[in-house]
Amino acid sequence: MPFVLWTRKAVKELIQDQFSIDMPISTVGQYLSRWGFTPQKPIKKSYEQQPKEVQKWLDNEYPTIKQDAVKEGAEFHWGDETGCSNKISHGRSYAPKGQTPTLVLSTKEKLRINMISSISNQGQVFFNIHKGKINSVEFIEFMNKLIRCTAKKVYFIVDNLPQHRSKLVKCWLDENKDAIKLFYLPAYSPELNPDEYLNCDLKDP
């Protein structure tokens, strides 16, 4: 059933439903382990994503972009925006058995900043920090810094945010077409963007 996540509890209930066997959940885990199943964090995909469009981009558009980059001697950069705050994102932690750890949180107002960043295929990272919302002006400012810091032409791949497609951005790109070229990922496809993983590492407690 592709529409569910398989947990030990789900398998236990399926066994109960199909065979009327009330199997201990620990035994279910042992069977899953023997069959080569391991507990894994699922990859999140947007419900609105169009798989055919994603595959078309992977099979046709991206290989063409790579060929053009080789001809122009350009380098790839993948860009994204994210927000950061002083609010702690915490998960589980270790403590002696029976002694639940306590995390003391501040009641002061939460502070938040926004970051725009890029990562190249060679792992080179650039970023800008902004207090307010990142708009087309900030996006252009970042691209200006990006082309000043790179010796080669930049092939910049981003998502489909409105500020990436604004008239202001298009005019700036026309004026700087010898230094940078902008490309767009398929809609609702953050898993294709390496910079998304950089954001996850940034926020990982």
Image (cartoon, rainbow, N blue to C red):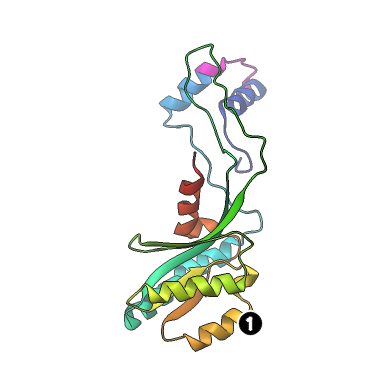
Query: What secondary structure do most residues of the magenta stretch adopt?
Result: loop
Q: Is residue 50 left or right of residue 150?
A: right
The amino acid type, in three-letter code, at marker 1 is Lys
Q: Nearer the viewer, residue 103 or 118?
A: 103
Q: Nearer the viewer, residue 83 or 155?
A: 83
Q: Which residue is pictured at 62% across the width and 20% down the height?
A: 19
Residue, disc 1: 167
Instruction: Identify the residue at the far bottom of this view.
Output: 175
Magenta segment, which residues?
19-26
Q: Do we see residue 60 in this rendering?
A: no
- In the displayed structure, would residue 179 be above or below residue 141? below
Q: Is residue 23 magenta?
A: yes
- In the displayed structure, would residue 3 be above or below residue 37? below
Residue 37 at x, y percent in the picture? 45, 32
Res. 82 image quadrant: bottom right
Q: Which residue is pictured at 62% across the width and 54% down the height?
A: 46
The tally of labels here is 1
Q: Do we see residue 148 in this rendering?
A: yes
Q: Quadrant of the N terminus?
A: top right
Q: Is residue 162 magenta?
A: no
- In the displayed structure, would residue 200 be above or below residue 96? below
Q: Which residue is pictured at 54% across the width and 83% down the height?
A: 172
Callout 1 secondary element: helix
Residue 54 at x, y percent in the picture? 54, 64
- In the displayed structure, would residue 61 be above or below residue 178? above
Residue 91 at x, y percent in the picture? 54, 32
